[in-house]
C-alpha cells in the first residue's frame, strides 16, 4: 500500500490553520518574527497562506480595493507593501492589528 504524503500547504490548511483562533496565533507569531528579522517577504508568505485558505486573490482584491495585479506583486515579493496595505489585507481576512506591551526580562 502506498502512503500518500501531503504538501506543506495541505498540512497547514488541514491541521494547523483550521480555525480562526489558530490562524490568529499563526499571524501573531509571523508578526512577532517580523519584529525581529524585518523580513516583510516572510510575513507576506504567512498572510498569503491565510488569504488562499479563505478564497481567491480576486475575492481579496474586492474586499480590500487593492487590484489583483498589486496583490500578486505583493505576494510575489516584487513590491514592498506599505503598512496601511498590510493592515487592510489583515482586516479583510477578518483579523485586526493590536499593540501590546513589550515583555522585558
Image: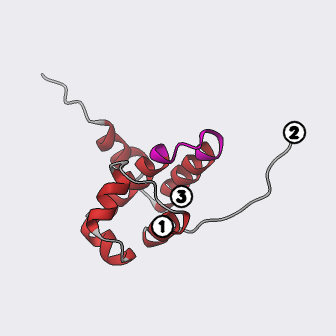
Residue wearing tag 3? 24
The 10 Å Cα crowd at callout 1, few under 14, some 14 to 19, many 20 or more, is some
Does 68 appear above or below 6?
Answer: below
Residue range corresponding to the magenta coloring: 34-42
Measured in 3D between alpha carbons, the distance from the residue under mark 1 to the one under mark 3, in whole angstroms, is: 18 Å
Whether residue 60 is in magenta: the answer is: no
Residue 56 in the figure: left or right of residue 105: left
Residue wearing tag 1? 85
Measured in 3D between alpha carbons, the distance from the residue under mark 1 to the one under mark 2, in whole angstroms, is: 33 Å
Which of 54 and 62 lies nearest the eye of the viewer? 62
Residue 55 appears in the picture as rendered: no
Disc 1, SS: helix
Whether residue 38 is in magenta: the answer is: yes
Disc 3, SS: helix
Q: Main secondary structure of the magenta part?
A: helix
Residue 11 in the figure: left or right of residue 1: right
Residue 74 in the figure: left or right of residue 86: left
Amino acid at each position: 500500500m502506498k502512503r500518500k504524503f501531503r504538501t506543506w500547504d495541505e498540512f497547514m490548511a488541514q491541521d494547523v490553520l483550521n480555525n480562526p483562533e489558530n490562524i490568529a496565533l499563526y499571524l501573531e507569531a509571523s508578526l512577532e518574527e517580523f519584529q525581529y528579522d524585518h523580513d516583510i517577504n516572510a510575513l507576506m508568505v504567512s498572510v498569503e497562506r491565510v488569504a488562499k485558505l479563505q478564497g481567491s486573490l480576486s475575492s481579496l482584491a474586492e474586499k480590500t480595493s487593492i487590484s489583483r495585479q498589486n496583490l500578486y506583486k505583493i505576494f510575489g515579493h516584487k513590491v514592498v507593501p506599505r503598512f496601511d496595505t498590510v493592515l487592510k489585507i489583515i482586516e479583510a481576512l477578518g483579523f485586526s492589528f493590536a499593540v501590546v506591551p513589550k515583555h522585558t526580562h
